[in-house]
Amino acid sequence: NAGVMQNPRHLVRRRGQEARLRCSPMKGHSHVYWYRQLPEEGLKFMVYLQKENIIDESGMPKERFSAEFPKEGPSILRIQQVVRGDSAAYFCASSPSIAQGASRDYGYTFGSGTRLTVV
Amino acid sequence: AQSVTQPDIHITVSEGASLELRCNYSYGATPYLFWYVQSPGQGLQLLLKYFSGDTLVQGIKGFEAEFKRSQSSFNLRKPSVHWSDAAEYFCAVGRAGGTSYGKLTFGQGTILTVHP
Protein backbone atom coordinates (compact mmCIF):
# COMPACT_ATOMS: atom_id res chain seq x y z
CA ASN A 1 0.00 0.00 0.00
CA ALA A 2 1.87 3.00 -1.28
CA GLY A 3 1.92 6.09 0.89
CA VAL A 4 1.24 9.62 -0.21
CA MET A 5 3.19 10.20 -3.40
CA GLN A 6 4.44 13.62 -4.35
CA ASN A 7 6.28 14.53 -7.50
CA PRO A 8 8.59 15.87 -8.45
CA ARG A 9 10.82 15.65 -5.37
CA HIS A 10 12.80 18.66 -6.51
CA LEU A 11 11.71 21.38 -8.89
CA VAL A 12 13.71 24.31 -10.14
CA ARG A 13 11.95 27.17 -11.86
CA ARG A 14 13.07 30.55 -13.13
CA ARG A 15 11.26 33.61 -11.92
CA GLY A 16 8.06 34.10 -13.89
CA GLN A 17 7.59 30.44 -14.80
CA GLU A 18 4.83 28.19 -13.59
CA ALA A 19 5.28 25.41 -11.06
CA ARG A 20 2.98 22.38 -10.87
CA LEU A 21 3.23 20.12 -7.87
CA ARG A 22 1.42 16.79 -7.80
CA CYS A 23 0.09 14.74 -4.94
CA SER A 24 -1.46 11.29 -5.11
CA PRO A 25 -3.17 10.43 -1.82
CA MET A 26 -3.03 7.06 -0.15
CA LYS A 27 -5.39 4.49 -1.55
CA GLY A 28 -8.85 5.02 -0.13
CA HIS A 29 -8.13 8.56 1.04
CA SER A 30 -10.38 11.28 -0.32
CA HIS A 31 -9.09 14.27 1.65
CA VAL A 32 -5.96 16.12 0.65
CA TYR A 33 -4.16 18.95 2.44
CA TRP A 34 -1.32 21.11 1.21
CA TYR A 35 1.22 22.72 3.50
CA ARG A 36 4.20 24.96 2.85
CA GLN A 37 7.40 24.94 4.84
CA LEU A 38 9.58 27.98 4.41
CA PRO A 39 13.24 27.72 5.43
CA GLU A 40 13.69 27.67 9.22
CA GLU A 41 9.94 27.56 9.79
CA GLY A 42 7.25 25.06 10.62
CA LEU A 43 4.57 23.94 8.24
CA LYS A 44 1.82 26.36 7.34
CA PHE A 45 -1.56 25.16 6.14
CA MET A 46 -2.48 26.24 2.64
CA VAL A 47 -5.56 24.40 1.40
CA TYR A 48 -7.85 21.47 2.16
CA LEU A 49 -9.56 19.65 -0.69
CA GLN A 50 -11.90 16.78 -1.25
CA LYS A 51 -12.56 15.32 -4.66
CA GLU A 52 -13.70 18.18 -6.93
CA ASN A 53 -14.19 20.50 -3.94
CA ILE A 54 -12.11 23.08 -2.14
CA ILE A 55 -13.14 22.92 1.50
CA ASP A 56 -10.80 25.43 3.11
CA GLU A 57 -8.34 27.66 1.27
CA SER A 58 -7.75 30.11 4.07
CA GLY A 59 -3.98 29.61 3.91
CA MET A 60 -3.58 30.15 0.18
CA PRO A 61 -1.97 33.37 -1.03
CA LYS A 62 -4.58 35.47 -2.78
CA GLU A 63 -2.75 35.60 -6.08
CA ARG A 64 -0.83 33.17 -8.29
CA PHE A 65 -1.66 30.07 -6.23
CA SER A 66 -4.39 27.57 -7.01
CA ALA A 67 -5.18 23.98 -6.13
CA GLU A 68 -7.43 21.29 -7.46
CA PHE A 69 -8.29 17.70 -6.74
CA PRO A 70 -10.14 16.30 -9.75
CA LYS A 71 -12.37 13.27 -9.78
CA GLU A 72 -9.61 11.31 -11.45
CA GLY A 73 -5.91 11.84 -10.99
CA PRO A 74 -3.71 13.54 -8.44
CA SER A 75 -4.21 16.79 -6.62
CA ILE A 76 -2.33 19.66 -8.23
CA LEU A 77 -0.91 22.74 -6.54
CA ARG A 78 -0.18 25.35 -9.17
CA ILE A 79 1.95 28.42 -8.71
CA GLN A 80 1.94 30.91 -11.55
CA GLN A 81 4.69 33.44 -12.22
CA VAL A 82 6.89 32.15 -9.42
CA VAL A 83 9.04 34.51 -7.39
CA ARG A 84 12.06 33.79 -5.18
CA GLY A 85 9.87 33.95 -2.08
CA ASP A 86 7.98 30.88 -3.30
CA SER A 87 11.09 28.76 -2.73
CA ALA A 88 10.05 26.29 -0.05
CA ALA A 89 9.16 22.69 0.62
CA TYR A 90 5.56 21.89 -0.22
CA PHE A 91 4.01 18.94 1.55
CA CYS A 92 0.85 17.10 0.81
CA ALA A 93 -1.06 14.98 3.31
CA SER A 94 -4.09 12.77 2.97
CA SER A 95 -6.66 11.28 5.27
CA PRO A 96 -9.63 8.97 4.86
CA SER A 97 -13.16 10.18 4.50
CA ILE A 98 -14.29 10.94 8.02
CA ALA A 99 -17.55 12.04 9.55
CA GLN A 100 -17.80 15.19 11.57
CA GLY A 101 -16.67 14.68 15.10
CA ALA A 102 -13.96 12.67 16.76
CA SER A 103 -12.32 9.89 14.85
CA ARG A 104 -9.52 7.62 15.87
CA ASP A 105 -8.33 7.75 12.29
CA TYR A 106 -7.74 11.48 12.53
CA GLY A 107 -4.19 12.05 11.64
CA TYR A 108 -2.41 12.59 8.44
CA THR A 109 -0.03 10.68 6.31
CA PHE A 110 2.40 13.09 4.74
CA GLY A 111 4.23 12.76 1.49
CA SER A 112 7.97 13.37 1.20
CA GLY A 113 7.41 16.82 -0.21
CA THR A 114 8.42 18.80 -3.26
CA ARG A 115 11.29 21.20 -2.79
CA LEU A 116 10.78 24.16 -5.05
CA THR A 117 13.70 26.41 -5.83
CA VAL A 118 13.12 29.59 -7.78
CA VAL A 119 16.22 31.02 -9.44
CA ALA B 1 -7.43 31.11 16.53
CA GLN B 2 -5.39 28.11 17.51
CA SER B 3 -1.62 28.37 17.96
CA VAL B 4 1.28 26.19 19.02
CA THR B 5 4.48 27.27 20.72
CA GLN B 6 7.60 25.19 20.95
CA PRO B 7 9.82 27.26 23.24
CA ASP B 8 13.06 25.45 22.45
CA ILE B 9 14.43 26.00 18.96
CA HIS B 10 17.41 23.71 19.48
CA ILE B 11 18.15 21.06 22.10
CA THR B 12 21.32 19.03 22.51
CA VAL B 13 21.48 15.86 24.58
CA SER B 14 23.92 13.02 25.03
CA GLU B 15 23.07 9.59 23.76
CA GLY B 16 21.35 7.62 26.50
CA ALA B 17 20.11 10.72 28.29
CA SER B 18 16.44 11.44 28.80
CA LEU B 19 14.61 13.93 26.61
CA GLU B 20 11.69 16.28 27.01
CA LEU B 21 10.51 18.58 24.22
CA ARG B 22 8.04 21.22 25.22
CA CYS B 23 4.85 22.16 23.44
CA ASN B 24 2.22 24.67 24.52
CA TYR B 25 -0.97 25.25 22.62
CA SER B 26 -3.75 27.77 22.55
CA TYR B 27 -7.17 26.53 21.58
CA GLY B 28 -10.72 27.26 22.67
CA ALA B 29 -11.94 23.70 22.92
CA THR B 30 -10.52 20.25 23.48
CA PRO B 31 -7.72 19.97 20.95
CA TYR B 32 -6.41 17.10 18.96
CA LEU B 33 -2.64 17.08 19.49
CA PHE B 34 0.15 15.53 17.49
CA TRP B 35 3.89 15.14 17.44
CA TYR B 36 5.71 14.65 14.15
CA VAL B 37 9.38 14.05 13.39
CA GLN B 38 11.19 15.21 10.28
CA SER B 39 14.65 14.08 9.20
CA PRO B 40 16.60 16.43 6.91
CA GLY B 41 15.16 16.50 3.42
CA GLN B 42 12.37 14.14 4.37
CA GLY B 43 8.66 14.31 5.00
CA LEU B 44 6.94 14.18 8.35
CA GLN B 45 6.35 11.01 10.29
CA LEU B 46 3.64 10.84 12.93
CA LEU B 47 5.06 9.86 16.33
CA LEU B 48 1.86 9.96 18.37
CA LYS B 49 -1.49 11.69 18.74
CA TYR B 50 -3.97 12.58 21.45
CA PHE B 51 -7.74 12.81 21.02
CA SER B 52 -9.28 12.06 24.38
CA GLY B 53 -9.11 9.64 27.26
CA ASP B 54 -5.82 8.67 28.83
CA THR B 55 -3.66 11.76 29.00
CA LEU B 56 -0.43 9.79 28.63
CA VAL B 57 -0.03 8.71 25.03
CA GLN B 58 2.44 6.14 23.79
CA GLY B 59 3.92 6.47 20.35
CA ILE B 60 6.44 4.86 18.07
CA LYS B 61 10.19 4.66 18.64
CA GLY B 62 9.78 4.71 22.42
CA PHE B 63 8.28 8.21 22.60
CA GLU B 64 5.44 9.26 24.83
CA ALA B 65 3.62 12.52 25.47
CA GLU B 66 1.42 13.80 28.26
CA PHE B 67 -1.56 16.08 27.75
CA LYS B 68 -1.98 18.55 30.61
CA ARG B 69 -5.08 20.61 30.11
CA SER B 70 -4.38 22.91 33.07
CA GLN B 71 -1.03 23.87 31.56
CA SER B 72 -2.12 23.75 27.90
CA SER B 73 0.86 21.54 27.27
CA PHE B 74 1.65 18.37 25.36
CA ASN B 75 5.30 17.64 26.05
CA LEU B 76 7.14 14.83 24.29
CA ARG B 77 9.42 12.56 26.28
CA LYS B 78 11.80 9.69 25.77
CA PRO B 79 13.67 8.02 28.62
CA SER B 80 16.84 7.21 26.66
CA VAL B 81 17.75 8.96 23.43
CA HIS B 82 19.47 7.19 20.54
CA TRP B 83 21.72 8.87 17.98
CA SER B 84 19.10 8.08 15.32
CA ASP B 85 16.61 10.34 17.11
CA ALA B 86 18.48 13.41 15.88
CA ALA B 87 15.92 15.26 13.75
CA GLU B 88 13.45 18.10 13.92
CA TYR B 89 10.30 17.62 15.96
CA PHE B 90 7.02 19.39 15.38
CA CYS B 91 4.04 19.69 17.67
CA ALA B 92 0.67 20.33 16.01
CA VAL B 93 -2.90 21.01 17.06
CA GLY B 94 -6.05 20.21 15.12
CA ARG B 95 -9.72 20.75 15.62
CA ALA B 96 -12.74 18.54 15.60
CA GLY B 97 -15.65 19.32 13.34
CA GLY B 98 -16.50 22.18 11.03
CA THR B 99 -14.96 22.95 7.70
CA SER B 100 -11.56 23.24 9.32
CA TYR B 101 -11.68 19.64 10.37
CA GLY B 102 -8.34 18.17 9.49
CA LYS B 103 -6.48 21.46 9.34
CA LEU B 104 -3.42 21.39 11.57
CA THR B 105 -1.49 24.27 13.09
CA PHE B 106 2.18 23.49 13.60
CA GLY B 107 4.74 24.84 16.00
CA GLN B 108 8.06 26.22 14.77
CA GLY B 109 9.84 22.98 15.48
CA THR B 110 12.63 21.88 17.81
CA ILE B 111 15.89 20.63 16.36
CA LEU B 112 17.35 17.78 18.39
CA THR B 113 21.07 17.11 18.28
CA VAL B 114 22.40 13.96 19.91
CA HIS B 115 26.02 13.77 21.07
CA PRO B 116 27.70 10.37 21.22
Image (cartoon, coloured by chain):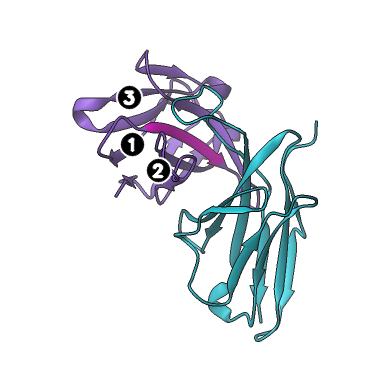
Chain colours: A cyan, B purple
Q: Chain of mark 1?
A: B
Residue A91: horizontal and vertical position, in percent?
61, 53
Q: Which range of residues does the magenta coloring cover?
A: B32-37
The kind of secondary structure element at disc 3 is strand
What residue is at 46 percent from the left and 42 percent from the top?
B90
Q: Residues within 10 Å of mark 1 (few under 14, many from 20)?
A: some
Query: Share a chain, discs 1 and 2?
Result: yes
| Depth order, front residue of A57/B90 | A57
Of tags 3 and 1, the one toward the viewer is 3
Residue A97: horizontal and vertical position, in percent?
61, 33
Query: What's under tag 2, amino acid-wise?
Result: Ile
Query: Share a chain, discs 3 and 1?
Result: yes
Q: In this picture, is A117 found above or below B39?
A: below
Q: Residue furthest left?
A: B70
Q: Chain of mark 2?
A: B
Of the 4 image quadrants, the one containing the C terminus of chain A is bottom right
What residue is at 30 percent from the left and 40 percent from the top?
B25
- N-term-proximal mark, 1 vs 2: 2
Residue A64: horizontal and vertical position, in percent?
58, 77
- Report the Cα–Cα distance between label 3 and label 2: 21 Å
| Depth order, front residue of A20/B96 | B96
B57 in the magenta segment: no
Can you tell which mark lies on residue A76?
none
- N-term-proximal mark, 3 vs 1: 1
